[in-house]
Image: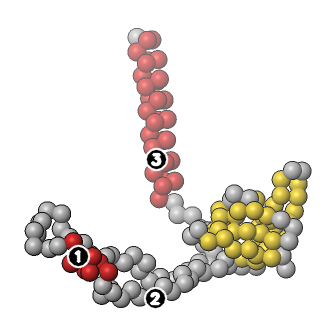
């Protein structure tokens, strides 16, 4: 008899703990906390011209035409029928931050950047938005975006 009472009390305590945990998690999930979101700046849209031009004046390898001679093939490939558009330089938007200076702590160098009025500290091989920090010196910082290196000089 005594054993059944102990088992009943233990099961009752375990049930209360389990249902209390479930209730606490459900309440916590539905409780909304105010999250402050900083101002989001829209990114400028850069439209690049298509840099790929297809030259489709080759002979079909599966439809071999015996009537075409080697001389006519050379004339076909050497004829200036294809008018390629002039190459326009690719426009890459510069960074939205300014280089303020360099800070050295031991062997590590940090660059101070002014991003929308806020000063942040970055090190080499770090990424800020779309920009990758290549190197930092006391006079300038070199950032890379889309394979193009840009130098920002200290103000």
The spot of residue 25 in percent (x, y) is 49, 48
Colouring rule applied to residues: secondary structure
Residue 65 image point, x, y percent: 11, 69
Answer with mark 2 or mark 3, whichever residue precedes in sequence: 3
Where in the figure is residue 53, as x and y percent of width and height?
A: 37, 78
Reply above or below: 4 against 46.
above
In this view, the mark in front (1 or 3): 1
- Quadrant in which residue 66 is drawn: bottom left
Q: Which mark is residue 129?
A: none
Is 80 situated above or below 21?
Answer: below
Quarter-wise, where is residue 147 in the image? Answer: bottom right
Residue in front for this viewpoint, 10 or 66:
66
Mark number displayed over residue 86: 2
Which of labels 2 and 3 is toward the front? 2
Q: Residue at x 27, y 76 (%)?
A: 74
**Does 134 sit left or right of 66 as displayed?**
right
Q: Which residue is mark 3?
A: 23
Q: CA distance from mark 2 to mark 3?
A: 68 Å
Q: Is residue 100 visible?
A: no
Q: Which residue is mark 1?
A: 71
Exactly how many numbered labels are in the figure? 3
From what the image shows, is residue 83 above or below residue 26? below
Q: Earlier in the sequence, mark 1 or mark 3?
A: 3
Sequence-wise, which precedes: disc 2 or disc 1? 1
Residue at coordinates 47% horizontally, 82% vertically from top-left? 48
Residue found at x 88% / y 54%: 105
- Using the numbered discs, state the Cα–Cα distance from disc 2 to disc 1 in whole angstroms: 30 Å
Mark 2 residue element: loop
Q: Is residue 151 left or right of residue 7?
A: right
Label 1, residues with CA under 10 Å away: few <14, some 14-19, many ≥20: few
Contact between labelled residues 1 and 2, with CB atoms less than 8 Å apart: no
Tell me how far mark 1 sits from mark 3, CA to CA: 86 Å
């Amino acid at each position: 008899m005594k054993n059944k009472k102990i088992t009943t009390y233990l099961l009752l305590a375990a049930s209360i703990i389990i249902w209390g945990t479930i209730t606490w998690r459900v309440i916590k999930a539905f409780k909304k906390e105010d999250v402050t979101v900083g101002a989001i700046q829209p990114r400028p849209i850069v439209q690049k011209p298509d840099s790929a031009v297809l030259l489709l004046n080759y002979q079909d390898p599966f439809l071999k035409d015996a009537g075409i001679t080697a001389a006519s093939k050379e004339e076909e490939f050497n004829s200036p029928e294809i008018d390629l558009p002039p190459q326009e330089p690719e426009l890459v938007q510069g960074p939205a931050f300014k280089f303020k200076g360099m800070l050295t702590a031991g062997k590590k160098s940090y660059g101070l950047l002014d991003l929308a009025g806020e000063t942040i500290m970055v090190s080499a091989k770090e990424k800020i938005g779309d920009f990758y920090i290549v190197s930092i010196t006391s006079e300038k910082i070199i950032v890379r975006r889309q394979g193009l290196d840009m130098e920002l000089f200290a103000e």
